Amino acid sequence: MLTYIIRRVLIIVPMAIGISFLIYLALDLSPGDAVTRMLNPVQTVDPERIEELRRALGLDAPLLVRYWIWFSGVLQGNFGRTLTGGVPISRILMERLPATLELSTIALVLSSIFGAILGTISALRRGTTTDNVLTVAGMIGVSIPEFFFGLVAIVIFALNLQWLPVGGRLLPSYDSYWDHIPNLIMPSLVLSIMMTAGVMRYARAAMLDALSREFIKTARSKGLPEWRVNLLHGFRVALTPVVVLIGFRLPILIGGSVIVEQVFQWPGLGNLFVLSVRNKDLPTVMTIALLSVVLVLVVSLVIDILTAIIDPRVRLGGD
Amino acid sequence: MRILKAAAVALLLQTGISTFAQAQALNANPLSDVRVRQAIAYAIDRNLIVESVFGGYAVPADGLLPNGPFKSPNLDAYPYDPEKAKALLAEAGWDSSRTLEMVYYYDDQITADLMAVLQAQLADVGINMTYGLIVGDVAKTLNSIPEDPKGKSVVTWDMAYGARAAMVMQEYFNDYATGKASADGFPGSPELDALIAESNTATDPEAAKATLMKIDEFINANAITLPLYYQQLQSVESTRLDRHGEPYGNDQFNYDWNVHNWTVTPDADGKAILYTNGAPLDYFEQPWVNLGLWAGNKFIWAHMLGSKPFLDGITGGDLAETYEMSEDGKTLTFTMREGTKWHDGEAITVDDVTFSLEFALKTPNLQGVLASVFNSIEGAAEYVAGTAEHVSGISSDGNTVTIKFTKPNANTLISFTQWGPFPKKYFEGVDPTLVQQAEFWQKPIGSGPFKVEEAKFGDFSSFVPFDDYYEGKPKIDQIIAWSSSDGDVNMVKNASANRIDFAVTKVVSDIEAIKALDFMRLTPLDIPYTRMVWFNQYDK
């Protein structure tokens, strides 16, 4: 297993480079650049001034040169500065990351726990009212767009009941970290519920699949108690695809949930990502994208390892 | 002499209109035929568009200039008349198999709806039209023209939908000058060029107004551009806010709105907090680009002179206590107000002004009217080209600053109502090309009634009264502005939650929603903002 892990870690590096270059290329091929985004479309500006700005921002250099300047900076721990505002990207990350992390961590944890539990209950109670209610709830959860769910929550809890703030994260009057918890409740719960629905449906299907396997029948024929059959044998196998699903949701820790952040005016990385794409601020977009890519690659490795630990049938690297 | 010159131009124009309007297609492009353009004007029902697409929150337009003192009585309204449109098309030999390509740059639903209506109305008279959003380099797609006005068009579009929000009326027309890269798609004419030049140099406001009306008539008679509607700006205010009679005006620009006199009902803690939107998402935009567009900049910055609410005159000095313009309109002298300070407590000096004027000349996207005025300062060209260390036409003596211009400009004074200096000490060593990328814009040190207390980009910005503001400390204890871009989608939501006391909007759905809130009020403002269709008349 150790050889397999080392091999996979070594592969992550060229993969991250390759993927980041493809993203850079795709962004570069789309029309316009950061300078065109700064201009008022109908205000004619001295083209010489604009070319000077382009040169000063290094946008006149060939694609490969620009990519290399950015990437070599990243290798030295320097993510560069935003093109439009000249702000160090590392500073923006430090400002925005906590907002995204607290939101997405809560959503990931809650959705993983409740999704797995509710999905399992639904499978074990197959065909009962409980199962039907949970299935319908799951269907609704995965079908309703996040923005709609968010807006409904705002109308009910912020505007009508006035229990929670309508959006935003901080205020000048917040003296301690805990002051902003009311702001956190609605976006994190909306994100959690939406994600729970997906995990629940996945867990139910996986549990049903596991319960129909031969080894479950064998366990039952051995006279093991039902809870033991379900939880120690069934649930353990059913957990594998659920872990994969949860694992591949980890990148939202970096990218944030773009929609929820927009609806709740949450100043996280998801909002920043949208703004940067709109401004064609390549260094910022690339930094967030690279972090997401690395996270996906690392998570995929971790999932493989976890799968092998959870499911005894899985062997890594042909070990 | 100036009046005589204006009369001569007007006479020339009369001749120009009669000959030009009778002309047929100028080249192989059917849109160069005035009859085709007029047919399109007759085919579009602007009243219907205003009522159905804009919910009545716009005014059908007949000219480019807004309704009011600059409106000419001689404009043809091109009333909706599809039969007349068909007759004109037949006369022009319109090829009904041809499809016109319309482009636009607003990515909102209302524009998509408008495009569908325009497409249907043109189809009714036998004109096929496709439409699409411009992506990428919008300015280049819109504004590229061939080097030779008689040359082939360098863009593919036939019609473009866009807007002009004018600080001064000349802005509506300057782009029509021959050889000026712009979206109007008009190759130019000597008659119009003469009028445009006249409108810019006329220092007599009445003469300038008459010339501007003539230009609008010329464009109208020849259907060079099709004005669709005037967009109103709505001032959105909560009932907590009391402006104490301070005026409403063109909130996209700077005027004497005297926000330091406004009050809001204090909250339970006794603190008078005004909530608004428009705080920056990642940095404060430097205020020489979009002038008064961002509320934050209006709080932070003072200007050299004060403007009337709709930018139709000067109210007096602001940072400059007095000003004097020479008879020939070529020398402007400011006497700076004593005791004005930056938000860091340092005195505002003539050095800050002279430095900022030179600095502005080298910034990349100085607002168009300001650029036109500043570039006509004596020695500006040499300074920009790098052959002179300073601008020879800018000098200071004691607390006066004197600026000499190479030619008079009708907009010199109004430009200084929109422009104020930066504190020199923060910009020494900063490359003017990268002015917006300076660290300064994370928490700018300004000169206006409020100073930046805190900026949590993407979340909010907080402004507090500047104790040393020369007109007196503002009465509001704090302004909290939610971060948002232009056309903020969260404005209504925040207003519904009592988190907006002041905002402006042009978005129809927002206006409808705000109207339903009994603790909010709307005040429509007739600003110079015309949405129009440009015709590409270059050869294709």
Image: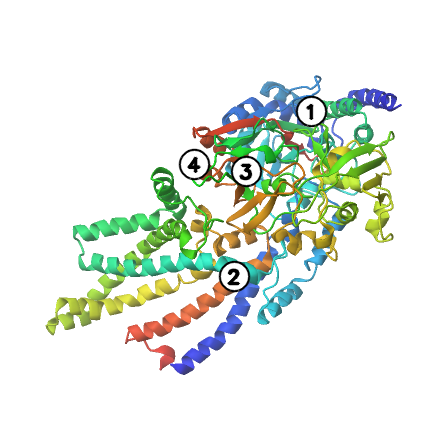
In front of the other: B345 or A99:
B345
In front of the other: B390 or B271:
B271
The Cα atoms of the two marked residues, 4 and 3, are separated by 22 Å
Q: Identify the mark at residue A94; answer none if there is no mark.
A: 2
The amino acid pointed to by label 1 is Arg
- Crowd around label 4: few <14 · some 14–19 · many ≥20 (10 Å): many
Residue that carries the numbered disc 1 in the rendered image: B35
The amino acid pointed to by label 3 is Ile
Q: Looking at the rendering, in which quadrant would you find the N terminus of chain B?
A: top right
Q: Is residue A316 above or below residue A103?
A: below
Q: Are marks 3 and 2 in contact (CB under 8 Å)?
A: no
Q: Secondary structure at mark 2?
A: helix
Q: Identify the mark at residue B392; answer none if there is no mark.
A: none
Which circle's residue, 4 or 1, is located before the other in the chain? 1
- Crowd around label 3: few <14 · some 14–19 · many ≥20 (10 Å): many
- Residues indicated by labels 1 and 3 sit on the same polypeptide chain: yes
Q: Of circles 4 and 3, which is in front?
A: 3
What chain letter is assigned to the residue under label 2? A
Residue A195 location in percent, x, y?
35, 55
Q: Quadrant of residue B399?
A: top right
Q: Identify the mark at residue B476; answer none if there is no mark.
A: 3
What chain letter is assigned to the residue under label 4? B
- Crowd around label 1: few <14 · some 14–19 · many ≥20 (10 Å): many
The amino acid pointed to by label 4 is Ser
- Crowd around label 2: few <14 · some 14–19 · many ≥20 (10 Å): few
